[in-house]
Image (cartoon, rainbow, N blue to C red):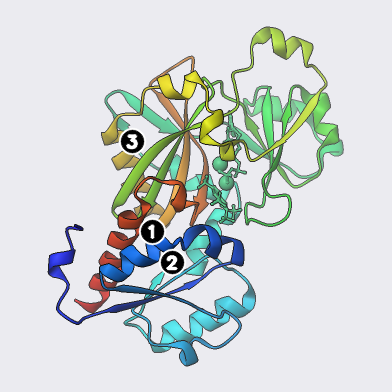
Amino acid sequence: MSKFESEVAEGERYRVGYALQTKKVESFLQPSLLDYAKQHAVDLVQIDPSSPLEQQAPFHCIIHKLHTPQWNKHLQQFSATHPDTAIIDPPELVSRLHDRVSMLEAVTHLQISLQNATVGVPNQVVVNEPKALDFDKIEQLGLRFPAIAKPLAADGGDGSHEMCLVFDREGLNALSAPTVLQEFVNHGGVLFKIYVAGRHVKCVKRKSLGDISEERLRTLKGEVLPFSRVSNLGVEEEGDAVEKAEMPPQCLVDELAKALREALGLNLFNIDVIRDSKEPTRYLVIDINYFPGYAKLPSYEPFITDFLLDAVRTKTN
Ligand SMILES: Nc1ncnc2c1ncn2[C@@H]1O[C@H](COP(=O)(O)OP(=O)(O)OP(=O)(O)O)[C@@H](O)[C@H]1O
Ligand SMILES: O=P(O)(O)O[C@H]1[C@H](OP(=O)(O)O)[C@@H](OP(=O)(O)O)[C@@H](O)[C@@H](O)[C@@H]1OP(=O)(O)O
Ligand SMILES: [Mg+2]
Ligand SMILES: [Mg+2]
């Protein structure tokens, strides 16, 4: 039983509207979530983003992962006239996660050091015109190869997950701009995904890119290796490294989630974190995603429902 169940006033129900792309509706709105939420006084209702929200009201809360101008306009008009509806989250704050530079800026301002562990971001630089690049400038900035070239835009659009491993500066010629060139940090092939839903936090392990040895680096000179969606590799494919990897200290996970939630002003996101193989107390945030795939978490139904109950209560109290 959820800890909130006993607190739900008899007969009181909460309407939570969701505005999501079809594929997200299919993955997120599992029957198990709809049922669990319903049993805990939360009715999840689908929003038609092309119609004014007024006609679809009332809503105690709205969750969304759409960013068309039309949707932003409908949401803005509705929130201006319905201050009691909890909007999770404001589009202007979500948009900070749509750019791989502004996404990580919040992390660089955090002062987290717990149990001797530190949290930072890998060195990175924006490359606009690869062919006209001043290669020495990249190296002067302290950026070392190998590196990962990531599309600057992380808005879920076409190609926003298509990356390349670049082994030396010659490889930059093959890239299309605008790209973020981020130092590749060996991390033992294991990624930590910290899922946040308000004050609720869960960290899981996933398979990641394997370490690149000095020898491999020599043989790969001049190469550019494209890849996409490594973090989506299925659980069954995960090797020993993932099973054996020690989780980051729970206090670090909690502290990082709380600090980023406050710095970003967001409730629904996950944080991709790696641990430097050379320096195991050094943690690096490499990616932050808005409204990620929560359904992949074990027991995501109470995780999400408890968050939604927090959101509606904060507004109605
Ligand atoms: N700086 C880095 N050093 C080492 N490996 C990295 C680094 N950045 C990314 N990776 C690897 O590449 C993968 C994809 O990178 P990233 O998470 O930035 O892409 P994404 O497409 O935004 O991912 P997601 O599907 O989580 O949104 C990571 O999951 C990790 O395995
Ligand atoms: O589709 P999935 O359920 O895997 O969720 C992924 C989500 O895709 P979706 O929102 O289109 O569904 C991605 O969003 P966009 O960047 O493409 O907008 C991004 O947030 C990934 O990190 C999520 O995977 P996770 O980090 O949880 O492994
Ligand atoms: Mg990622
Ligand atoms: Mg991402």
Cα–Cα span, label 3 and label 1: 20 Å
Does residue 61 show up? yes
Sort mark 1 into few (<14), some (14-19) or many (20+) by Cα contacts within 10 Å: many
Where does the image place residue 210, in percent across and percent down from the top left?
59, 21
Label 1, on which residue? 267
Determine whether 283 is above or below 71 in the image: above
**Label 2: which secondary element:** loop
**What is the number of the mark on residue 89?**
2
Residue occupying the point 34% across, 43% down: 202
Query: With 210 as the anchor, is 276 left or right in this view?
Result: left
Sort mark 3 into few (<14), some (14-19) or many (20+) by Cα contacts within 10 Å: some
Determine whether 26 is above or below 142 in the image: below
Sort mark 2 into few (<14), some (14-19) or many (20+) by Cα contacts within 10 Å: some
* Relative depth, front residue between 223 and 129: 223
Q: Are marks 1 and 2 in contact (CB under 8 Å)?
A: yes
Query: With 208 as the anchor, is 224 left or right in this view?
Result: right
Quarter of the displayed picture in which ligand 1 can be seen: top right
- The image quarter in which residue 204 lies: top left
Is the N terminus in the top left, top right, bottom left or bottom right quadrant?
bottom left
Q: Are marks 2 and 3 in contact (CB under 8 Å)?
A: no
- The image quarter in which residue 199 lies: bottom left
Q: Are marks 3 and 1 in contact (CB under 8 Å)?
A: no
**What is the number of the mark on residue 235?**
none
Pick whichever of labels 2 and 3 is earlier in the sequence. Answer: 2
**What is the number of the mark on residue 112?**
3
Ligand 1 within 8 Å, label 3 CB: no
Label 3 amino acid? Answer: Ile
Viewer-side label of 3, 1: 1
Label 2 amino acid? Answer: Asp
Label 1 amino acid? Answer: Asn
* Relative depth, front residue between 4 and 127: 4
